Amino acid sequence: MTLDRRAFLGVAVAASAAALPATSLASVAPARPSHPLDPLTPAECTAIKAVLAAAPQLGPRTVFVWTQLNEPPKDEVLAYVAGAPFRREALVVALSPEHRTSYEFVVDVEKRTILSSKDLGDLQPFLSDMEYGRAADVADASPEIRAALIARGYALPGKISDRFFIDTYAPGDDPATVRDSKTIRAVRTLFADRQGGHNDYGPYVEGLMALVDIYAGTILAIEDRPGATAHVAVPFDVFSPAVLGPPVATRDLSVAPKTIADLHRDGNAVRWGKWRFRYGFNQREGLVLYQIGFDDGGSTPRSICYRMSISEMLVPYADPSPGWIWREFFDSGEYGLGLMSIQARAGKELPDNALTVDVYLPDETLADHAPSPGRVSFYERDAGALLGHRQTGDGRRIYARAKELVVGFVATVGNYDYGFGYVFRLDGSFGFEANLNGLILSKTVDGLQANAGDERFGTMVSPQLVGVTHQHWINLRLDFDIDGVANAVDEINVAPQPPDPVTNPAGRALVATRTPLATSREACRTIDDATDRSWIVFNPSKRSAIGHAPGYEIEPAGNTFSSIPASRFGEPSSFVQRHLWVTPYDPQQLYAAGKYPNQHPHGYADGLATYAGDQSIHDRDIVVWYSLGFTHVTRPEDFPIMPSERVAVNFKPRGFFTKTATLGYARTDGPEPD
Ligand SMILES: [Cu+2]
């Protein structure tokens, strides 16, 4: 979970930008945004920095950990007409090593004033780029760590980091950090043996961990328990030809169109076929889609969803031993999915026909204005048949091929690489998918084959390495506004009816029952494959010509159940305990585990479990949260690098249209001669 950055707090870093290709900044972020939801521009960040220079709380070592658009109130955005003035505010969370705390500011960018400021006290923003290097340097210089490694039989002629990858993690739940959370900013460092290769994720030195205080630059505690070490060569180095073996001769399959002729971008506004949306990008969530609508032939597109984003990601590991017990990673709230985003490349991570777009992500000094290349991607892909039929009698045919637009980004969160995509389809459905790639986390064990107990919480994937069982959880936040802001949610369960000689003589009567979910509490729901359970978000005030309320059905496409017990309900991880949540719209509630889950103190009550009280969710502006999980019982085939794994959810129109939405794409031919 470490970025290889070598900068210290308070020292300006611009080196990462130097190697980037020369991209026209103007094409990334114009000096003046053209829409209230446009991300912050470099010029605006310069203004923000100037405003905050006057803040008495901040000093020369300030780190601007988190800077993004403070989105205007929704009613202002919905009422906005092109060309009219609009407010520009920024959320800025600044780390103050001098005061051993963080401050949250809201800045009026236009008026150049600070609208609000607060000391976050015992709350911590996600880790900043610089802190990884800072923590690694502290551990690297530790004589105690050096001694612990030498005691395990490692030769260390040079620095610890010459041989070991010093892996840095948010602290998770740790008694020391909870007790002193107000005055320390903790990270954990672990030690992975590169064994002389290029892959950082070599076998970990089990039992050895240093807890580092970023503010002081000191080690708070060292855990040095007996644990396994891998002194034999382990074939983990995926950058080594010897590990990869001979390449397979193959020709790439090309089924994607070479262009995206149907895609039109105007700044951050996108049109693709009948779909309309805007996009933004920030350090916390990465890609955000706004104002998703569908052109149904009326004077304006029909609204479907005001805002869609990944609100949190959680990866809990199953091994309860001391070296692993704390490993529950909030990839968004502790690390920042946008901050972890990488350049995605057409023909490599993406299909040949992908269009990649640069974004501007403010850096920790608010002074480095280099664009972040290739953070957002658009591509079309073949999606099989859109519709089709052949008439037996005369051979007439109707047919159409389907294609999809994928809008996404890639984030490398330490060992794992996630390809996230929002998928738009011609039939009016859309969806979300996450492609899980990368390297599994392994526990080093003593044997070349599994000994008793080694595989209780994992699978032996290589000599001395057990891939630890874990789950991946993604929470999607969808502010549905179907044909207006006041929406509601029903649950649909499909169940066979009891056989009855009169009413159900064949015994296969099947009834889909719609049950209204009246309150947030009622709407904390789990999937049920036995009843084909789904949920429909709809506008209760509208009716189609045949009497349906226009809606979108949430259709699970694979999921899992939480490994975290009900007894822990109320903690930031609670969002994984239910698949569906519905809350009244609150613009402050954007993150399923709350705004500051990193190093959270006991009693931290921000997050979905708190948001979902007993409020009415019927016929009002509501937000739907969907938790999408994958239980990963590792396989030998996941080592040394896992094949891509996909998890998804779909949102399908149900009653939104009055008929097949794809008729215009259909072609016909025939009749065919006998
Ligand atoms: Cu996994």
Image (cartoon, grey):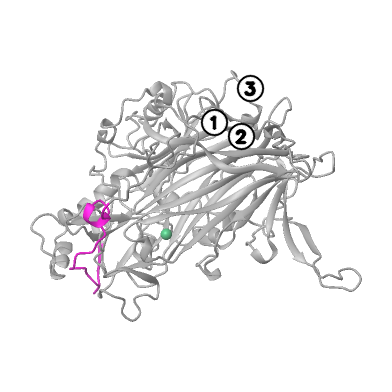
Residue at image position (45%, 34%) is 353
The answer to whether residue 123 is seen in the rendering is no
Crowd tier of the residue under label 2, counting other residues whose Cα lies within 10 Å: few below 14, some 14–19, many 20 or above: many
Residue 606, position as x, y percentages in the image: 53, 54
Residue projecting furthest to the right: 502
Quadrant in which ligand 1 is drawn: bottom left
What element does badge 1 sit on?
A: loop
Please report the bounds of the magenta region as a residue range. Answer: 221-246
In the orientation shown, which residue stands out farthest toward the left? 157
Residue 333 vs residue 644, the one in the foreground: 644
Q: CA distance from mark 1 to mark 3?
A: 13 Å
Q: Is residue 8 above or below residue 77?
A: below
**Identity of the amino acid at label 3?**
Val
Q: Earlier in the sequence, mark 1 or mark 3?
A: 1
Q: Nearer the viewer, mark 2 or mark 1?
A: 2
Q: Is 232 part of what is drawn in magenta? A: yes
The dot on residue 37 is 1
The label shown at residue 81 is 3
Q: Earlier in the sequence, mark 2 or mark 1?
A: 1
Question: Disc 2 marks which amino acid?
Answer: Gln
Contact between marks 3 and 2 (CB within 8 A): the answer is no
Q: Which residue is mark 2?
A: 291
